[in-house]
Amino acid sequence: MTTFSKVVERLGGGFPTGAFGRTYRIWRGVADFSSVLTWDDLNTVIGRGRLEPPRLRLHRDGELIPWQRYATAVTTRRNVVWQRIQPSGLHNQLHDGASLVLDAVDELHQPAERLAQALEGVFRGRVQINVYASWTATEGFGTHWDDHDVIVVQLEGAKRWRLYGPTRLNPLHRDTEVPEPPADEPIEEIVLRAGDMLYLPRGWWHAVAATEGRSLHLTCGLQTTTGADLLGWLSDRLRTSETVRAHLPVFASPQEQAAYLELLRKEVADALHDGAIGDFLTTRDVLHARLTTARAQLTDNDQGQVVLVAGGEEWTFASPVRAVLSPLLDGSSLPLGRLAEASGLTVGQVASLVTELVHANVAAVSEP
C-alpha cells in the first residue's frame, strides 16, 4: 500500500461523519512520509525557484521577520522589482530560532502534489500544502487559529502542539467578529513524531514548537466550503429566473412587495431541493473547462481589461478573468471550482464565462 493510499485509508471510516469540522483527531504511525518531502528536497525546491517573500517567509515568537533581514531587492532590466533570498542572511535567521514557511509546495514538488490530489479526492475541495521547517524549539507563530481546516503531516523530527479549542465556532476569513484569544490552559498537549498525522478544524487555537532539534512538517489546508458558498452559487444559478432579474419593487405598495417576496421565496425554496448540495459540488469540482483552439491569445488593454482572441473572435473581460483563462491557454483542463478560487470569482460567474466561450466553439466543458 502506498503512502497516499494509507493516508486516504486513515481518513475514511467514521472520521468524515464523526470528527470532520467538529474536533481534532490524531493518527499515529500512518506511513513513512519521507517519500513526500525531505530536507534535501526542500533545499532543491528553494534553490531552483524564485521563491521571494511572502511565499517564502520567516517567523519567530509570533512575529513575521522583515524580508530585508534575509533578502535583497533586485530590479530587472524591465524594471520589475523582486526579493532575492540571501543564503547567509537566511541561515543566520534560522540559527537564531526562526521558522521557515514555504507556501504551495504542491505546485513545486510532484510527490507533494500527489498528496494534495489524494486529499482532494477525500474532501472534495481544493488543498494547498505549505512546508514548515524549524531548527530550534522557539515558537514561530505564537498562539493562533486558522480560517480553514488542516491536515498536518509530520515528516521528520517532532513538534509539540498545544490545542486550546475554538472561541468562536466556524470563523471565516472575512467574518463579522474576531475570535477572542483563549483564556484557559490547553485542553490537550500532544507531540507529533515522524509518520504521525493530525486533523485540526478551523478556528481551533493552537501553539506549535519543535521539541527535539530540527522539525519538518506539512500543513495541508483544506478549502472551506460553507453555506455562504452554496447560497452564492444558488444566487448565480437563479439569474435565469425572471423574478430574480426583475427590479425590486421599491416603490410598490406593501401588498405588491409582499407578493414579490412570496414569489422569490418559492423560487429559492425550490432551488434548495434535497440534492442541491450534490449539484453544487458537482458543478464546482467535477465539471472541467478547456480551450479548444491552440492559438488563443490573452493580452491586456489600456483600461486594465483582459482581451481574449480565439477562433477569429475577440472578447474583453474584467481583469480577474485573467486568472481563469491563463491556466487554460496551454490546453489544460481544470475544474471550474479551482478557476473560481484562483480568480476570486464565483463558480456561477466562471460557468457563465465558459458557457459564452462554448457557444462560440472555442471552449468545452467535460467531466474528468
Image (tube, rainbow, N blue to C red):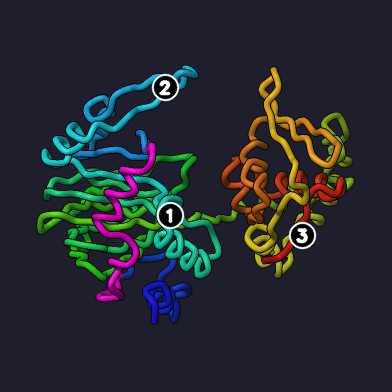
SS class of the residue under badge 2? strand
Mark 3–mark 2 contact, CB under 8 Å? Answer: no
- Amino acid type at image mark 1: Asp
In percent of width and height, residue 246 lies at 87, 39
Nearest to the eye among marks 1 and 3: give it: 1
Please identify the quarter of the rendering in which residue 33 is found: bottom left
The residue that label 3 is drawn on is 271
In three-dimensional space, the C-alpha distance between marks 1 and 2, rounded to whole angstroms, equals 25 Å
206 left or right of 341?
Answer: left
**Residue 160 at x, y percent in the picture:** 17, 59
- Sequence-first disc among 1 and 2: 2
Q: Residues within 10 Å of mark 1 (few under 14, many from 20)?
A: many
Give x and y (percent) for residue 285. Answer: 63, 60
Q: Find the distance from the CA under tag 1 to the CA under tag 3.
A: 37 Å
- Which range of residues does the magenta coloring cover? 26-50
Reading the image, the residue beneath label 1 is: 106
Q: Is residue 187 left or right of residue 356?
A: left
Q: In which quarter of the image is the C terminus?
A: bottom right
Q: Is mark 1 on a helix, strand or loop?
A: helix
